[in-house]
Image (tube, rainbow, N blue to C red):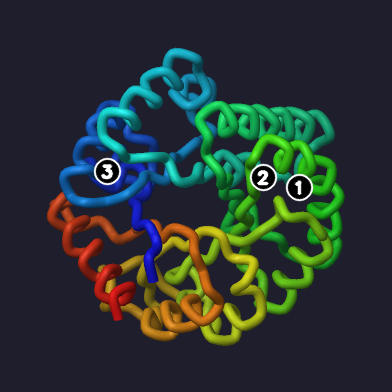
Amino acid sequence: MKNSVGIMQGRLSPPVDGRIQAFPWDCWEREFFQAKEIGLDLIDWIVEADRLHENPILTNQGSKTIKTLMSKTGIRIGAVCADYFMDCPLLRCSPSELKERLEVLDLLIVRLNNLNIKYLEIPFVDNSAIKDAAELEQIKQVIKPTLEKAYQLGVTFAFETSLPDETFKAFLLSLNHPAARANYDTGNSASLGYNPKEELEAYGKLVVTVHIKDRILNGGTVPLGQGNTDFATCFLTLRAKKYAGPFILQVARSGDEIESAKGNLAFVRKYLNE
């Protein structure tokens, strides 16, 4: 498999306030050079609710700096992980809140187009998880009007959910649009006890980004190879589905993020080269 391999933004820097994932305000520029030195291909950018409109990807000056860094290093932004929608979900909110959140979605589409970023990862997990059929229908109605604009601007939504495989597949097919696709998270699926073969047989052809992570069944993130993720089956099935998208390291913290990234890159490339 000749896929690009990237890393989730912040995973090359010390954790922010002890959090496993957060925008690295003090060192985001440096991560482009670190990624290049390690041999990675791309960065998966983070947009959070905290200081939303200060995020460089949403400012004109920040976008100019990002373009310069990409040009200097050859490290591109493969996707934007919209963690904003974890804290501000498109569910269980007032009409005014929904309007504001859809405005953020619209802004993200425009900014991704400006930087030629193809994938916008939208999580429906944890705080934003879809809990029942009524919420699933609600999300369909909220998302459908946004799909054509995203498509026209070259942006594809990569939804991440905790839904069972056939339910998730049905959701994607019901949207019936080339801008509606899936993100697959190896660790989150393992934690939920899902069978990766069954999942990827169900909707593998709709997967456009993959997060590489290892987790314990019903538990947290652990170093790659120490949890319940069946990486061999994941990579084999994705290969069979002709998956051509990026693999993003969204791994456990180690205390030495650079050395950890090197080891994790080697871990992924071993499977890609088999």
Label 2 is placed on what type of residue?
Pro
> Residue 89's mark?
2
> Residue 92's mark?
1
Is the residue 121 above or below the residue 260 in the image? above
Eye-nearest disc, 1 or 2 = 2
The reply to whether discs 3 and 1 touch (Cβ–Cβ < 8 Å) is: no
Label 3 is placed on what type of residue?
Pro
Q: Which of the two labelled residues, at mark 3 and mark 1, occupies the earlier sequence position?
A: 3
Label 1 is placed on what type of residue?
Arg
The picture places residue 64, in percent across and down from the top left corner, at 42, 18
The picture places residue 14, in percent across and down from the top left corner, at 22, 42
Q: Residue furthest front?
A: 2
- Which quarter shows the C terminus? bottom left
Which of 211/6 is in front?
Answer: 6
In the picture of the structure, the residue carrying the numbered disc 3 is: 15
The reply to whether discs 1 and 2 touch (Cβ–Cβ < 8 Å) is: yes
